[in-house]
Image: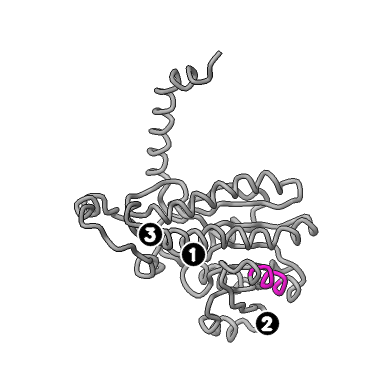
Amino acid sequence: MHTTWFITGTSTGLGREWAEAALERGDRVAATARDTTTLEPLASKYGDAVLPIALDVTDRTAVFDAVAHAAGHFGGLDVVVNNAGYGHLGMVEEITEAELRAQLETNFFGTVWVTQAVLPLMRAQRSGRILQVTSEGGVRAYPGFGAYHASKWAVEGISESLAQEVAAFGIHVTNVEPGPYATGFATAAHASAPNADYDEVREATAPDFQIGDPHATRSAMLRIADAERPPLHVFLGRPLADVEQIYAERLRTWREWEPVALEAFGA
């Protein structure tokens, strides 16, 4: 039995790596991208095992049509990877309404539309894996990435609710949280017009990222998808140590202020 995947954002980067990993081991992949010409090498190499689909995930109707097309073509879907997205850079004060809405439309709403489209199919077959690609930025935050973090934290939150709602149907949900990888994320990111008042803050808080090799994520993603009990959260890369410190500080602060919290509860 071959596993059938539906992966968004497969033109480049991590999505492309995961599509190739699945195809190389004999699985079948419905691969989506805004421009399907980027998928021609996959179609040429893997033939009928890959179904290229042109898709803008912000178009809810198109998303439902794409999922129906893929499921009809392959006879079902086993693993859905919500990977399509981009980064927007800018201090919170700098972000325009249009920029913030566009970030959420792709990263958050696009993920929700795909998820809603596949759920009836997975409920009917009483099985399925939904892998939500949120990033390290879904559980922590850096200055200058507020719009991006807002979109990814939203995906984390809705997916935690989703996991509890669909467990009885045999559907597993995983928030996949990659650290920084050499995917061209920074060069492809959108950016707000800078406010000079933040120049010193920008310089002082610029993160010194350790950049991972996207190719190295292939086997990890396959293991997550194949796991009998896939995790609700899993990092890819090396962000755990930093995140542990952040969450330890949150717990310390909550405990320090617990008397105030209890006082606020009342009698």
The residue drawn where x is 75% and y is 59% is 120
- Crowding at dot 3, Cα within 10 Å, few <14 / some 14-19 / many 20+, comes out as some
- Mark 3 / mark 1, whichever is N-terminal: 1
State the separation of the CA atoms marked 2 and 3: 44 Å
- Mark 2 / mark 3, whichever is N-terminal: 2
Q: Give the residue type at disc 1.
A: Gly
State the separation of the CA atoms marked 1 and 2: 26 Å
- Crowding at dot 2, Cα within 10 Å, few <14 / some 14-19 / many 20+, comes out as few
The residue drawn where x is 34% and y is 64% is 191
Please tell me the numbered disc located at residue 48: 2
Q: Is residue 96 left or right of residue 41?
A: left
Please tell me the numbered disc located at residue 96: 3
The residue to which callout 1 is attached is 85
Magenta residue check for 64? yes
Q: Estimate the x, y position of residue 234 in percent, counting from the top left.
A: 53, 50
Q: Give the residue type at disc 2.
A: Asp
Task: Please say if 18 is above or below 42.
Answer: above
Task: Please say if 252 is above or below 163.
Answer: above
* Secondary structure beneath label 3: loop
Residue range highlighted in magenta: 63-70
Q: Quadrant of residue 125?
A: bottom right
Looking at the image, which is closer to me, 247 or 109?
A: 109
- Mark 1 / mark 2, whichever is N-terminal: 2
- Crowding at dot 1, Cα within 10 Å, few <14 / some 14-19 / many 20+, comes out as many
Please tell me the numbered disc located at residue 264: none
Looking at the image, which is closer to me, 25 or 66?
A: 66
Quadrant for the N terminus in the image: bottom right
Instruction: Single out the residue that lies furthest toward the front.
Output: 97
Instruction: Single out the residue that lies furthest toward the right.
Output: 124
Looking at the image, which is closer to me, 126 or 17?
A: 126
Instruction: Single out the residue that lies furthest toward the top.
Output: 267
Q: Estimate the x, y position of residue 201 in percent, counting from the top left.
A: 23, 50
